[in-house]
C-alpha cells in the first residue's frame, strides 16, 4: 500500500511540475526529424523527452555492463571447473602410473587432453609412457606438440631429445639438445647428453670440445676423475681418426696430449708407435714400445712387438725380447706361456715343449694351452699324453683362445683395441691368461663411466691366435 501511495504521489508531483513549467514556458519548438517530417513540441516536453532518453540510455549501459559481468563470471566459473576437472584427471593419471596401472594412466591422460589439448604436463607424461612402451613416433608427436606450446621449456626439450635418440634419429636429437644449450649454455645435463650422442656417432672432435668444458665444471671429486678419464679417451680417439685419415703430425699431438693426461694410458703409446711405423721409423717405434713395457709390464706391448718383428721377418728379436722379460721376472707364468706359444708358431717344437711343460697356472684357464700341448705330444709320438691333453681341451666351452678381456665389463675378444666395444671404457683390456683378475687395469678407477655400445676398431693389427 505504501509503495502504491508513493507511486501515486510521485506521478501527481510530476504532472504538477510539468504543468507548472509548461505555463511558465509558453510556445512551441519545431523539431525536424526528416526533410518533410517535423514535430511541434513545447520546451518542457522536449526537456522531459531528452531526460527520458538519457535515462533509458543509462539504463541500457548499466544493463549491458551487468550482462557482460554476469557472462564473464559464468565463463570464469566454467573455465575454473574445467581446469579442476583436468587437474583431477592428470592427478589420477600420475597416481595410476606410479601404481603401474599403465593402461589406466594412458586413458586418464588422454581424457585430460581431450578437455585441454594444450596441457603441457599431461603431454609430457603421456609421451614418456609411450616412449617406455617403445612407441617412439607417438612420444615424439606429443612432445613436439608440447614444445610448440612452450618452446623454452627445458624439460620438454630433454624428453624430446630422449625420444629422438631412442628412435635412432640422432641428428634430430642433437638439434633438440642444441636448442637447450642456446637457452641455457651451461646446462650440464644437455652437455652430457650431447657429448654421449657425439661419441655414439664417433664425432670425436665435437665430443672433445664439450669434454674440455665438462672437465672444468664444478663437479664432485669422483665425477671429476671420471670426466678426466673420458677427456683422455676422447683425445686419443681424435688422434686415432686423424691417423686413419693420414694426418700423422696432428695425431701425434693428440696422442701426446692423452699421455700427458694419463701416463699409464697404453692406447696412446701404441698410437705413437704406429705413427713411427708408418713413417718408416721402425727402430724408434720398437724403442718406444720397449720403454713402455719396462714402465708398465703390460703383455699387450709384447704382443704388438711380436707382430711387428714377425712382419719384418725378424723372429729372433721378439724371442730375445721375451727372454729378456723372463730374465727380469723368471716366475711369470704368463710370459712363459706366450714365449712357448711363439716357439710353437715358429715351429720350434723342442723349445716350445720345454717351456710349456713347466708352466703352472694358465693351463687351468685356456683351451689353447692344451691344444698346443696335444700337438707337441703328437709330434713327439707321445700318443697317450696327446689324448689326455685333447680331453682337457674338450672340457672347455670355448673352442679357441680368447686372448683379451676387459677388466671393467669382462668382455672377451680376439682383437685388442684401445676401447672396449661393450662398456665404452678405454685402457681396460688385459691379455689372458690374467692371473691377477681381482685388480683393475693400470691407471683405471673402479668408478668407470657409463657403458656405451659403440663400434670401434683399434689401431694395432689383430694378434694371431693358435
Image (cartoon, rainbow, N blue to C red):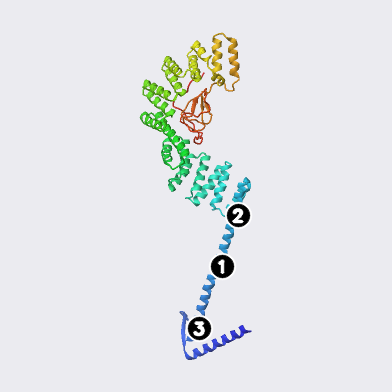
Q: Dots 3 and 2: beta carbons under 8 Å? A: no
Question: How far separated are the C-alphas under marks 3 and 2?
Answer: 59 Å
* Disc ID at residue 88: 2
Give neighbour class at mark 1: few <14, some 14-19, many 20+ (Cα, 10 Å): few
Which of discs 3 and 2 lies nearer the camera? The answer is: 2
> Looking at the image, which is closer to me, 336 or 289?
336
Question: How far separated are the C-alphas under marks 1 and 3?
Answer: 33 Å
Which of discs 1 and 3 lies nearer the camera? The answer is: 1
Q: Is residue 27 left or right of residue 388?
A: left
Of the numbered discs 1 and 3, the one sitting upstream in the chain is 3
Is residue 175 placed above or below 340 in the rendered structure? below
- Residue 203 seen anywhere in this rendered image of the structure: no
SS at circle 2: helix
Q: Position of residue 213 (x, y in %)?
A: 41, 41
Q: Position of residue 211 (x, y in %)?
A: 43, 38
> Looking at the image, which is closer to me, 120 or 186?
186
Which of discs 2 and 1 lies nearer the camera? The answer is: 2
Residue lying furthest bottom:
23
Give neighbour class at mark 2: few <14, some 14-19, many 20+ (Cα, 10 Å): some
> Disc 3 marks which residue?
48
Determine the residue positioned at 58% across, 18% down.
393
* Disc ID at residue 399: none
> Looking at the image, which is closer to me, 272 or 134?
272
> Disc 1 marks which residue?
70
Q: Position of residue 358 (x, y in %)?
A: 53, 14
- Quadrant location, the N terminus: bottom right
Give neighbour class at mark 3: few <14, some 14-19, many 20+ (Cα, 10 Å): few
Amino acid at each position: 500500500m505504501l509503495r502504491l501511495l508513493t507511486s501515486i504521489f510521485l506521478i501527481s508531483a510530476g504532472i504538477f511540475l510539468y504543468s507548472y513549467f509548461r505555463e511558465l514556458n509558453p510556445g512551441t519548438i519545431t523539431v525536424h526529424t526528416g526533410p518533410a517530417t517535423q514535430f511541434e513540441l513545447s520546451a518542457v516536453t522536449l526537456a522531459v523527452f531528452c531526460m527520458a532518453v538519457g535515462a533509458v540510455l543509462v539504463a541500457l549501459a548499466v544493463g549491458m555492463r551487468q550482462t557482460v559481468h554476469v557472462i564473464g563470471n559464468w565463463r570464469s566459473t566454467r573455465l575454473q571447473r574445467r581446469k579442476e576437472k583436468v587437474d583431477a584427471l592428470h592427478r589420477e593419471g600420475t597416481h595410476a602410473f606410479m601404481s603401474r596401472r599403465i593402461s589406466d594412466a594412458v586413458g586418464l591422460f588422454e581424457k585430460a587432453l581431450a578437455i585441454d589439448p594444450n596441457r603441457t604436463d599431461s603431454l609430457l607424461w603421456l609421451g614418456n609412457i609411450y616412449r617406455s612402451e617403445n612407441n617412439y613416433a607417438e612420444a615424439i608427436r606429443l612432445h613436439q606438440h608440447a614444445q610448440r606450446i612452450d618452446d623454452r621449456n627445458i624439460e620438454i626439450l630433454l624428453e624430446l631429445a630422449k625420444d629422438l635418440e631412442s628412435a635412432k634419429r640422432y641428428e634430430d636429437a642433437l638439434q633438440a639438445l642444441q636448442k637447450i644449450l642456446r637457452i641455457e649454455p651451461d646446462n650440464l645435463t644437455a652437455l652430457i647428453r650431447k657429448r654421449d650422442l657425439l661419441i655414439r656417432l664417433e664425432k670425436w672432435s665435437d665430443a672433445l670440445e664439450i669434454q674440455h668444458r665438462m672437465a672444468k665444471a664444478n663437479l664432485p671429486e669422483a665425477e671429476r676423475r671420471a670426466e678426466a678419464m673420458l677427456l683422455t679417451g676422447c683425445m686419443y680417439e681424435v688422434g686415432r681418426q686423424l691417423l686413419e685419415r693420414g694426418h700423422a703430425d696432428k695425431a701425434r699431438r693428440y696422442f701426446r696430449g692423452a699421455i700427458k693426461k694419463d701416463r699409464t694410458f697404453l692406447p696412446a703409446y701404441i698410437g705413437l708407435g704406429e705413427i713411427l711405423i708408418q713413417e718408416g721409423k721402425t727402430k724408434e717405434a720398437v724403442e718406444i714400445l720397449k720403454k713402455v713395457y719396462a714402465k708398465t709390464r703390460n703383455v699387450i706391448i709384447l704382443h704388438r712387438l711380436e707382430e711387428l718383428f714377425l712382419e719384418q721377418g725378424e723372429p729372433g728379436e721378439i724371442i730375445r725380447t721375451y727372454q729378456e722379460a723372463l730374465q727380469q721376472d723368471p716366475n711369470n707364468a704368463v710370459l712363459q706361456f706366450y714365449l712357448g706359444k711363439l716357439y710353437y708358431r715358429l715351429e720350434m717344437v723342442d723349445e716350445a715343449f720345454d717351456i710349456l711343460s713347466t708352466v703352472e697356472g694358465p693351463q687351468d684357464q685356456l683351451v689353447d694351452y692344451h691344444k698346443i700341448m696335444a700337438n707337441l705330444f703328437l709330434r713327439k709320438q707321445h700318443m697317450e699324453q696327446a689324448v689326455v691333453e685333447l680331453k682337457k681341451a674338450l672340457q672347455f666351452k670355448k673352442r679357441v683362445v680368447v686372448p683379451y678381456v676387459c677388466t671393467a665389463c669382462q668382455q672377451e675378444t680376439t682383437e685388442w683395441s684401445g676401447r672396449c666395444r661393450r662398456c665404452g671404457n678405454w685402457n681396460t683390456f688385459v691379455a689372458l691368461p690374467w692371473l691377477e683378475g681381482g685388480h683393475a687395469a693400470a691407471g683405471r678407477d673402479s668408478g668407470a663411466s657409463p657403458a656405451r655400445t659403440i663400434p670401434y676398431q683399434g689401431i694395432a693389427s689383430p694378434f694371431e691366435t693358435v
